[in-house]
Amino acid sequence: MRARSPVASRKRKKKVLKQAKGYWGRRSKNYRRAIETLRRAYVYAYNHRRLKKREFRSLWITRLNAAARERGTSYRELINDLKNNNIILSRNVLALIASENPEVFDKIVETVKK
């Protein structure tokens, strides 16, 4: 008699179908379709985790540029002056400061311009 493991295969299938829950039509009920769809979904998830970082950096730069222009400078000049004055702040932190504490951002810009 050949060795079989219905418990393990059932567990594996239930796991896959649970992950595919909510998909349209057969994709959520048919094991093979669910595997195909999930593989594709994992690829998208992997790629978009990396894309998210790029998109947020772009957003921070846009916000910083807008805040810097309100204060009579540009993003490029602001970042250059920050580096020249050895002020190490990430774009994320700078964008947060610019939006939540404009007076602090004003002081940073004044300090850098001198």
Image (spheres, helix red, strand yellow):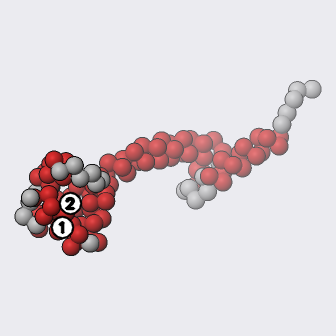
Expressed as whole percent of the image width and height from the top left, the position of residue 64 reads 20, 60
CA neighbours of label 1 inside 10 A, class few (<14), some (14 to 19), many (20+)? few
Q: Is residue 3 above or below residue 50?
A: above
Instruction: Give 114 or 73, whichever is nearer the viewer.
Output: 114
Instruction: Give 79 or 16, whichever is nearer the viewer.
Output: 79
Side (left or right) of 39 relative to 80: right
Q: Residue at x 22, y 62 (%)?
A: 63
Name the N-terminal-most of marks 2 and 1: 2
Q: What's the residue type where badge 1 is placed?
A: Lys
Q: Residue at x 60, y 46 (%)?
A: 34
> Is residue 66 visible in the rendered structure shown here?
no
Q: What's the residue type where badge 2 is placed?
A: Leu
Quickly name the residue at label 2. Answer: 64
Q: Quadrant of the C terminus?
A: bottom left
Quickly name the residue at label 1. Answer: 107
Q: CA distance from mark 2 to mark 1?
A: 15 Å
- Residue 112 sits in which quadrant? bottom left
Q: Secondary structure at mark 2?
A: helix
Q: Quadrant of the N terminus?
A: top right
- Residue 62 sits in which quadrant? bottom left
Q: Is residue 97 above or below residue 31?
A: below
